[in-house]
Amino acid sequence: AMRADKTDTAFRAMIYAAAALINSR
Protein backbone atom coordinates (compact mmCIF):
# COMPACT_ATOMS: atom_id res chain seq x y z
CA ALA A 1 0.00 0.00 0.00
CA MET A 2 2.99 2.25 0.47
CA ARG A 3 4.55 1.70 -2.95
CA ALA A 4 1.71 0.99 -5.36
CA ASP A 5 -1.76 2.29 -4.64
CA LYS A 6 -3.16 0.90 -7.89
CA THR A 7 -2.00 -2.63 -7.09
CA ASP A 8 -3.35 -2.33 -3.55
CA THR A 9 -6.73 -1.20 -4.86
CA ALA A 10 -6.94 -4.11 -7.29
CA PHE A 11 -5.89 -6.50 -4.53
CA ARG A 12 -8.57 -5.15 -2.20
CA ALA A 13 -11.15 -5.52 -5.00
CA MET A 14 -10.16 -9.17 -5.41
CA ILE A 15 -10.43 -9.81 -1.67
CA TYR A 16 -13.80 -8.02 -1.55
CA ALA A 17 -15.12 -10.14 -4.44
CA ALA A 18 -13.87 -13.34 -2.81
CA ALA A 19 -15.47 -12.37 0.51
CA ALA A 20 -18.75 -11.62 -1.27
CA LEU A 21 -18.71 -15.06 -2.89
CA ILE A 22 -17.99 -16.76 0.43
CA ASN A 23 -20.72 -14.76 2.18
CA SER A 24 -23.11 -15.66 -0.64
CA ARG A 25 -22.67 -19.33 0.19
Image (tube, rainbow, N blue to C red):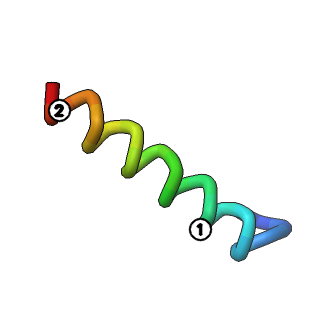
Spot occupied by residue 14 in the image (x, y as percentages of width and height): 52, 50
Going from the N terminus, do you reach mark 1 or mark 2 first?
1
**Residue appearing at x 59%, y 68% in the figure:** 9
Q: Secondary structure at mark 1?
A: helix
The amino acid at mark 2 is Asn
Is 23 drawn above or below residue 6 in the view shown? above
Secondary element under disc 2, as helix, strand or loop, is helix
Say which residue appears at 40% left-offset and 39% top-offset: 18
Q: Is residue 2 above or below residue 6?
A: above
Residue found at the very far bottom of the displayed protein: 6
Q: Quadrant of the N terminus?
A: bottom right
Residue at image mark 1 = 9
Q: Residues within 10 Å of mark 2 (few under 14, many from 20)?
A: few
Name which residue type carries label 1. Answer: Thr
For image coordinates 61% across by 54% down, the residue present is: 11
Q: How many marks?
A: 2
On residue 20, the disc is none
Q: Mark 1 against mark 2, which lies toward the viewer? A: 2
3 vs 15, nearest the viewer = 15
Q: Image quarter for residue 3?
A: bottom right
Q: Is residue 1 above or below residue 23?
A: below
Report the residue that reaches farthest toward the left. Answer: 24
- The residue at 71%/74% (across/down) is 5
Numbered mark located on residue 23 in the image = 2
